[in-house]
Image (cartoon, coloured by chain):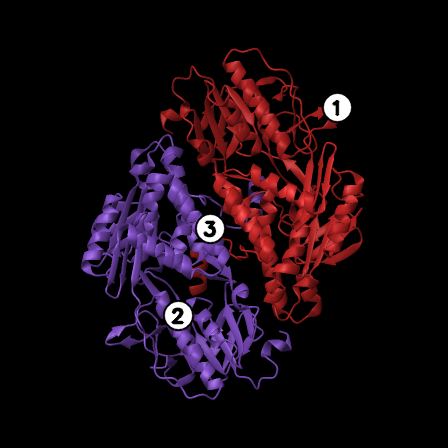
Chain colours: A purple, B red
Amino acid sequence: MPERMGHEGAARPRVVVVGGGFGGLEVVRALGRAPVDITLIDRQNHHCFQPLLYQVATAALSPADIAWPIRGIVGSRPNVTVLMAEVDAVDTAGRCVRTTAADIPYDVLVLATGATHSYFGHDEWSEAAPGLKRVEDATEIRRRVLIAFERAELVSDPAERARLMTFVLVGGGPTGVEMAGAIAELARHALPLDFHHIDPRRARIVLVEAGPRILAAFPEHLSAYAKRALEKMGVEVRTGVPVTACDESGVTLAEERLPAATIIWAAGVVASPAARWLGVESDRAGRVPVEADLSVPGHPEIFAIGDTATRKQDGKPIPGIAPAAKQMGRYVGRRIAARAAGEPETGPFVYRHQGDLATIGRKAAVVKLGRLELRGFLGWVFWSVVHVYFLIGTRNRLSVALSWGWNYLTFQRGARLITETGPPVLRRRQKEG
Amino acid sequence: MPERMGHEGAARPRVVVVGGGFGGLEVVRALGRAPVDITLIDRQNHHCFQPLLYQVATAALSPADIAWPIRGIVGSRPNVTVLMAEVDAVDTAGRCVRTTAADIPYDVLVLATGATHSYFGHDEWSEAAPGLKRVEDATEIRRRVLIAFERAELVSDPAERARLMTFVLVGGGPTGVEMAGAIAELARHALPLDFHHIDPRRARIVLVEAGPRILAAFPEHLSAYAKRALEKMGVEVRTGVPVTACDESGVTLAEERLPAATIIWAAGVVASPAARWLGVESDRAGRVPVEADLSVPGHPEIFAIGDTATRKQDGKPIPGIAPAAKQMGRYVGRRIAARAAGEPETGPFVYRHQGDLATIGRKAAVVKLGRLELRGFLGWVFWSVVHVYFLIGTRNRLSVALSWGWNYLTFQRGARLITETGPPVLRRRQKEG
């Protein structure tokens, strides 16, 4: 490592932020020009706008529309060093983060490492039922969905064809609902003319929720509306049904076997291994319980935010959603800045729930903001505006607005590409060999 | 297979086109509403606009900007069946194409399978020096280029850092020239502010050409202009230098060893195995010599076009470029349509060379159209307009125009994403395990 990496002139506090998601970026933003040296560590070079990942997975948007290089966002700040590396461990005694690239000493550490899918102890399901957390997940799911229709076009066996044209979404939260609606539109609007031996409109899309209703975070009547809207689009909504098995050939719902070529996991999440790094107690989902100032118990110099942390407010856990992660990031950033400036400490963190949004499809969404409730077309317009607004970068806003306008007018999907996974060079040589 | 696949009511001639590139698509277009049943076979689901692949490889455009689902282009035609499959062999006696999906009988066969990179008998170089033919190649090269800067930011050893910041383009044709210019701009304009320990502007970009000059298809003075323009952008242009070795650590030019982390192959191409399928003689580059009507000697029912075929006109071979492939495709399509309609046969194929274009970078390109010669900014504008015009789909035209306008004004690159190769699901499990 260049010595520079250790932040020479270390009179300035060294702040290390792990994770370039909504929470981590907000910490860096909130620190602004504070007299600290910041190192932002992420294993990927880009920030991914997860709320729209499902649109990449369903060929409506391109990865570059919803992902932005972290260096492009914060790299130009003189007091910010961006490090693309994986964290192996944290030496809390020596105050040092061990990464695949180098050991990064810190005075203050912020863990914003997010969450990944939880298969509730059935990690062997992950291959058959990928989840949707990263750009690579989205392009892999896009490949599977499009390939399923290509294969269905080729087979003559009706049972196999039915299996290929069955898509199961596990989990009735916003992601599951949005994926179900998006796949339904893909099948019903974008693809029908393209195939001669199958009718994509007859694709079977099943949304499975173990709980009593979908979109449990919303009021009951909005959940009911979402269910009706999905069913109108031809999606089967199955509530109160647990997934008991899951493999390449399909899923088992309680006792019933459902043959399906494409299964997408939108059920549980589990926090990244941050708790293990610190050697502290974590909750069932691997999240670190934090103090009122979001610091880790016994470590006032370490903060955990977003999906990495768990904290109750008014008896209810703060939800694992982007706005919560951003609020936590802003709070921690300001707190660190205040400390560095020798200003009085701020009060405890208070989460303000702004509301919930979920889109069901073209012209249908549910919105709950305090007293305001929107659904249908209005909700959909509101949802679109909000998401375009929160995208990073004017270019992405323009590009996404263009894609959505285009998809809306033409029902086409621009990003319907099946690209191979694995190094193409190797593949070609295998083929030639 | 569904029986339908065999084209019931086979009174209509069955035309099978292998390859959804410029040539193959043009055949289908030219056949129009002719009374024939067409099956278009491609191993990929999308047509790729190869002239702009280098912009995906250098993070200026997204794959979906320059690739379009083949079904979306021709799939809606009632007399066209699109088949995503790989061709294993052609049974010329039984008039049947054997594919991974099914055996497709034909009355007329058109082979438009294009070319891949040729390493002149050194296939072992392909891993260290990938070429640029498919979308996957472009995203893989993009990954390598961006990763090289990330690694350079981390290493302290000056020699290794220099190796990581050295980019070698092998081959001084349009692709090599365009890649060299695009990487130079990426390093000099898009990245400098993003890194603190390296200065991307000091990246070493070397364009290697074995022949006496780059852009050999152009008049000498335009080649000279291109060389000067590249050198002004900081690209080293080395002509008359053969590559004698190539591996992960660098390249050997004649006797000189050049350590380089990123090597891109833009030198030779070799035709796809079509000649082997037919069991006919092919030239050194594997291309099938064709008759005046582009049919394969001894097989009036089989046509070979584009990079799959070789034919001399006025003593000079018809160049392996997109316009030539399109002209051949149009000719063959019309000829087949005429036959089917019982109209008199058309005359022999005559290639009309429309000209040559190559862009060197922002505001610099060389254009030679008959007597018209353009260079610099004018050439660049002309080049841009032509390429946007030839893109398939209004949406792609809008999207590319937006990206270019944006890149031009801001020097930013929207698609600077490093995504992993290989199934992410597996990777995550490996990491967790």
Residue sitting at 29 percent across and 62 percent down? A356
Q: Position of residue B114 (x, y in %)?
A: 59, 34
Q: What kind of residue is marked 3?
A: Ser
Q: CA distance from mark 2 to mark 1?
A: 68 Å
Circles 3 and 2 in contact, beta carbons < 8 Å:
no
**In front: A66, or B366?**
B366
For disc 2, the marked residue is A326
Q: Secondary structure at mark 1?
A: loop
Mark 2 surroundings: few (<14), some (14-19) or many (≥20) residues within 10 A: many
Residue topped by disc 1: B314
Which residue is drawn at the image coordinates 44% and 66% (left, top)? A21
- Image quadrant of residue B2? top left
**Residue A133 visible within the image:** no
Q: Residues within 10 Å of mark 1 (few under 14, many from 20)?
A: few
Label 3: how many residues lie within 10 Å, few (<14), some (14-19) or many (20+)? Answer: many
Label 3, secondary structure: give it.
loop
The mark that comes first in sequence, 3 or 2, is 3
Q: Which mark is residue A62?
A: 3
